[in-house]
Image (cartoon, coloured by chain):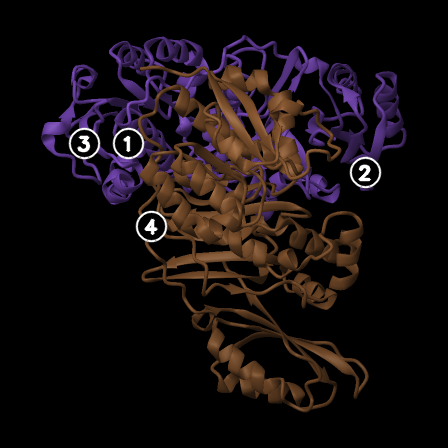
Chain colours: A purple, B brown
Amino acid sequence: MTTKKTIGIGLLGLGTVGTGVWKLLEQNGDLLKERAGVSLEIKRVCVRDPKKKREIQVPENLISINPDDILNDPGVDIVVELMGGIEPAGKILIEAIRRGKHVVTANKALIADRGEKLFKAAREKGVSFGFEASVAGGIPIIKAIREGFIANRIQEIYGIINGTANFILTEMADRGGDFSTVLKQAQKEGFAEQDPSFDVKGIDASQKLSILISLCYGVTPPREGMYVEGIDRVTGLDIEFARKLGYVIKLLAISKDHAGAVEARVHPTMVPLHHPLADVKGVFNAIYLKGDAVGETMFFGRGAGMMPTASAVVSDIAQIAQEVSRGYAAPAVLPVMKTPTIQPIEELVTPYYFRFSVVDRPGVLAQIAKHLGDHDISIANVYQQERDAGAKVPIVVMTHDAHERNVRQSVEKIDKLESVLDRTMVIRVERFGK
Amino acid sequence: MTTKKTIGIGLLGLGTVGTGVWKLLEQNGDLLKERAGVSLEIKRVCVRDPKKKREIQVPENLISINPDDILNDPGVDIVVELMGGIEPAGKILIEAIRRGKHVVTANKALIADRGEKLFKAAREKGVSFGFEASVAGGIPIIKAIREGFIANRIQEIYGIINGTANFILTEMADRGGDFSTVLKQAQKEGFAEQDPSFDVKGIDASQKLSILISLCYGVTPPREGMYVEGIDRVTGLDIEFARKLGYVIKLLAISKDHAGAVEARVHPTMVPLHHPLADVKGVFNAIYLKGDAVGETMFFGRGAGMMPTASAVVSDIAQIAQEVSRGYAAPAVLPVMKTPTIQPIEELVTPYYFRFSVVDRPGVLAQIAKHLGDHDISIANVYQQERDAGAKVPIVVMTHDAHERNVRQSVEKIDKLESVLDRTMVIRVERFGK
């Protein structure tokens, strides 16, 4: 069998992550060669604007503006897609696979949207497909699930997988301030995008959860039916009450594999203070999994950033390069893909936190309690601060297990009461399989 | 190329972990076949006592008391060693390798002691060598280091890697009680061995640290020169003071890669309360790593137990089985092994916690402070409770960065003072690279 000693790489995109990959191969190339037993060589780099000032020195003869130059280069064994966006990235990867090239991508939107098609194409062509960097940046969670936990049925997934949202919630908890103030500060400091909706509305987290669900349960990445709610309605008051009640509010991506249906939801969540996820602060990410053999595990680290993401991309490149150089006859088989049934959010049963904004006068709590009782929602705790009669005051209620459908119906009625002044804040409480 | 669809396994040992492996292959065998694309079949099981009552049903024709029956069986592709102990396990594995069989082991003592020889034999023969279960049970930390972080220079390692010691320290902190009381309770509940010294003296943790050092820095597992101190001198008073000062006491395995020398030590450590390792409770393990690209990461999970450990063993088996079935030309290259230079503990520079037991009379603190000052040890905080004159009272001192050599010399002198009644408690404070 012939073995190759140098593996050629074609880089599509030279933004933050692409620059990180270039730097990391330069900085730790010798180490990689020693460990992987093979040399990695960037043969071509495709960029949009070859004239752009960059912090790295790329020889001119490697640079191209046409992806075809990478696809046509017989010296390119692995195509590394770091352009982002669904098209043309998707088409280029399909074409790369068609030509027998192995592919690596950090593109979560692409995997969440086209994963099934891409995995199928790679499987049929017999090429490898790496996407470690698409979820939780530098944390090797995809490898852990696919290889480390290969003998487990993963039953529960809990992820803090959006650094921007976690940064904002951490700042609100540690320094005080309402969502919009902290968001503005985060934008100024570069921790949030100018258009932050992708992160704070939970969309980014839902794409990553979709990929995790696919890997953990061996299903196609779900695209519809997932409940997604952002952190933009969380107030400093909620965070304060949460702490008093023994919780911290996190944007959690949650999935549980029930017989027949999969729970899949992203929303602000009350996490008990003693739980390992409660201490994941700032831009850090963490994924907490429960498997039938391994039990509870958690993986923590930087979910974004130039070098952490490059670390994940290069780990994929190195693995494929080792396989290619040692003549692996076929790539890792991807699990048989079934289409999952997503459980509608209305069927969720969990405890709830309610913050009602009411006018401070006798009988209001009784009214609210009656509506809850009528909908079979049993109260565990009530917290009401006395203030001036007639003023707007919060009433906080923690429930026992309740049905989301009942919660929605009762809150809709409560919000119509004359003594209820603002829309009620509802936050789901997580008990982690207990 | 011929590919094999069924991979034969020879199991050496049917204790807790061996039983777990049998059960897991039975329970999730179909899943494994689907994911790995290959069937795993236990061909032979070697036990000491074939008559022993077991919770699993092993067909009689598979059972043998002679390891040679496994080594001689051409149907056995992978030898899985779960006997424990250094010999005869070591000799059997060398012989298995010599005969071209792949090997998997959960035996940390063996890897720490004979790793170099075993790795070399496997490399020369071209067989795979899996030892995921040897550190931190079900946590796929070895895979994460060798593959997930292949592009990183790991610079710092911090591990809570002994469940028994962590359980005892957690109980002391959460429920109170001194070391010996809690240890007895732990023994009664099955969380500590009847002879607990291997765990509470830090020996087990030092073997695991030795393996982590080997993998992270690409060196042979260090066997000598590591500083190892157990938790048996930690008192409830220390835990109480720690909390007041913003710390929790953990048995930490620590290593930092300095240019030229490697810090390697296991001892009770003051961990800041806000650090992710501070919340690792009970029998859970966690490993916190810092890499030059990925930054800080942490892996958390069950470090022992039948099914978590079996999860790790079977992940090794599945990986090798996939390689064998797909005709991998050569096994993963193990890093070039250099012998590390271990930095003597006397050269450590870190902050320290001292608890002096003194007679409560004027001038004692001044005497102690003078000795510390004479040895260039600068005090950050002093905590002294007033009690009855003449009684034994604790004085707690937190220092700025100090040299261990100076600490030892000064404490030796202080312990000879007439007003100092017990041996001074010294606990190193960890600031995690800050």
- Using the numbered discs, state the Cα–Cα distance from disc 2 to disc 1 in whole angstroms: 51 Å
| Residue beneath disc 3 | A52
State the quadrant of the C terminus of chain A.
top right
Q: Nearer the viewer, mark 3 or mark 4?
A: 4
- The secondary structure type at the circle numbered 1 is helix
- Using the numbered discs, state the Cα–Cα distance from disc 4 to disc 2 in whole angstroms: 62 Å
Chain for mark 2?
A
Give me the disc on residue A286.
none
- Using the numbered discs, state the Cα–Cα distance from disc 3 to disc 1 in whole angstroms: 14 Å
- Which amino acid lies under the numbered mark 3 shown in the image of this protein? Lys
- The secondary structure type at the circle numbered 3 is loop
- The secondary structure type at the circle numbered 2 is strand
- Which amino acid lies under the numbered mark 2 shown in the image of this protein? Tyr
Front in this rendered view, residue A307 or B128: B128
- Using the numbered discs, state the Cα–Cα distance from disc 2 to disc 3 in whole angstroms: 58 Å
| Residue beneath disc 1 | A18
Assess disc 2: are there few (<14), some (14-19) or many (≥20) residues with their C-alpha within 10 Å of its C-alpha.
some
- Using the numbered discs, state the Cα–Cα distance from disc 4 to disc 1 in whole angstroms: 32 Å
**Residue B383 at what x, y percent from top left?**
66, 74
State the quadrant of the N terminus of chain A.
top left
**Residue A172 at what x, y percent from top left?**
58, 42
| Residue beneath disc 2 | A383
State whether residue A178 is above or below residue A260: below
Assess disc 4: are there few (<14), some (14-19) or many (≥20) residues with their C-alpha within 10 Å of its C-alpha.
some
Front in this rendered view, residue A422 or A397: A397
| Residue beneath disc 4 | B337
